[in-house]
């Protein structure tokens, strides 16, 4: 049991080290030797868990996918509107990115041409599904204008969300992400949500940003 625990800890250490380097340097600019040095493990330990750098990238993207699904499941269990659930999911992903390198690396890998192997789905495809379902629910709940093109809005929202993070990574600290996400939602809410319901969601965007900043 102790040996298995040590192996799991070593694997987690390697993944975290790889994620940190992939996030800061990019996938192509990071070698397995770089990861060994950063993780402070032996090459044998790395190859015991991962046969190739691609396997490490896939493990990181898989962890990112699990985190997104966990956030979605948590929102499904809560008694909140579809639009609130979608907002909380996006801020939850942003919070994870602030707290650790794996979600940040997962995004960079997804935008960096790393092949996503089945049965894992591309994270953007998953996020599109998450957004589409919640936006469709928001139309039914009258939180969005009834003539909203849900598919177009879902696509635009994911592009906005990903683009905000990609641009932010290059020009400002990661802790600025919650502020940019709140700004994104304020723009979307003013365009999509009927006036009588607008104040509630504008307030929620500010509240969710503050919750991350105070962690």
Image: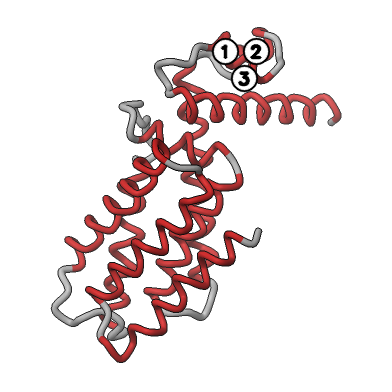
Tag 3 near tag 2, CB within 8 Å: no
Q: Residues within 10 Å of mark 3 (few under 14, many from 20)?
A: some
Residue 13 to residue 51: above or below: below
Colouring used for the render: secondary structure
Q: Which residue corresponds to the image point at 31% horizontal and 57% vertical from the top-left?
A: 129
Tag 1 near tag 2, CB within 8 Å: yes
Q: Secondary structure at mark 3?
A: helix
Give the spatial CA distance, label 3 vs label 2: 16 Å
Q: Which label belongs to residue 37?
A: 2
**Residue reaching furthest front?**
171
Q: Which label belongs to residue 49?
A: 3
Q: Secondary structure at mark 1?
A: helix
Q: Which label belongs to residue 167?
A: none
Q: Residues within 10 Å of mark 1 (few under 14, many from 20)?
A: some
- Image quadrant occupied by the C terminus: bottom right
Give the spatial CA distance, label 1 vs label 2: 5 Å
Q: Which residue is mark 1?
A: 34
Q: Relative to residue 49, is residue 54 drawn left or right?
A: left
Dot placed on the residue nearer the N-terminal end, 1 or 3? 1
Q: Relative to residue 109, is residue 46 drawn left or right?
A: right
Q: Give whichever of 209, 41 is nearer the camera.
A: 209
Q: Which residue corresponds to the image point at 58% horizontal and 60% vertical from the top-left?
A: 212
For the residues carrying marks 3 and 2, which lies nearer the camera in this image? 2
Give the spatial CA distance, label 1 vs label 3: 16 Å
Q: Residues within 10 Å of mark 2 (few under 14, many from 20)?
A: few
């Amino acid at each position: 049991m102790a040996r298995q625990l040590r192996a799991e800890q070593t694997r987690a250490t390697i993944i975290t080290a790889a994620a940190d380097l992939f996030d800061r340097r990019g996938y192509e600019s990071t070698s397995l030797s770089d990861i060994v040095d950063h993780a402070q493990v032996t090459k044998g330990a790395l190859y015991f868990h991962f046969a190739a750098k691609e396997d490490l990238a896939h493990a990181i993207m898989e962890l990112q996918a699990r985190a997104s699904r966990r956030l979605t499941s948590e929102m499904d269990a809560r008694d909140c509107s579809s639009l609130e659930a979608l907002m909380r999911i996006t801020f939850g992903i942003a919070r994870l990115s602030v707290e650790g390198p794996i979600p940040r690396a997962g995004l960079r890998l997804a935008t960096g041409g790393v092949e996503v192997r089945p049965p894992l789905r591309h994270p953007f495809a998953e996020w599109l599904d998450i957004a589409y379902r919640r936006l469709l629910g928001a139309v039914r709940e009258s939180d969005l204008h009834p003539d909203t093109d849900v598919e177009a809005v879902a696509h635009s929202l994911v592009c906005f969300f990903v683009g905000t993070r990609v641009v932010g990574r290059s020009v400002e600290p990661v802790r600025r992400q919650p502020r940019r996400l709140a700004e994104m939602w304020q723009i979307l809410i003013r365009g999509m949500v009927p006036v009588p319901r607008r104040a509630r969601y504008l307030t929620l965007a500010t509240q969710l940003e503050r919750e991350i900043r105070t962690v």
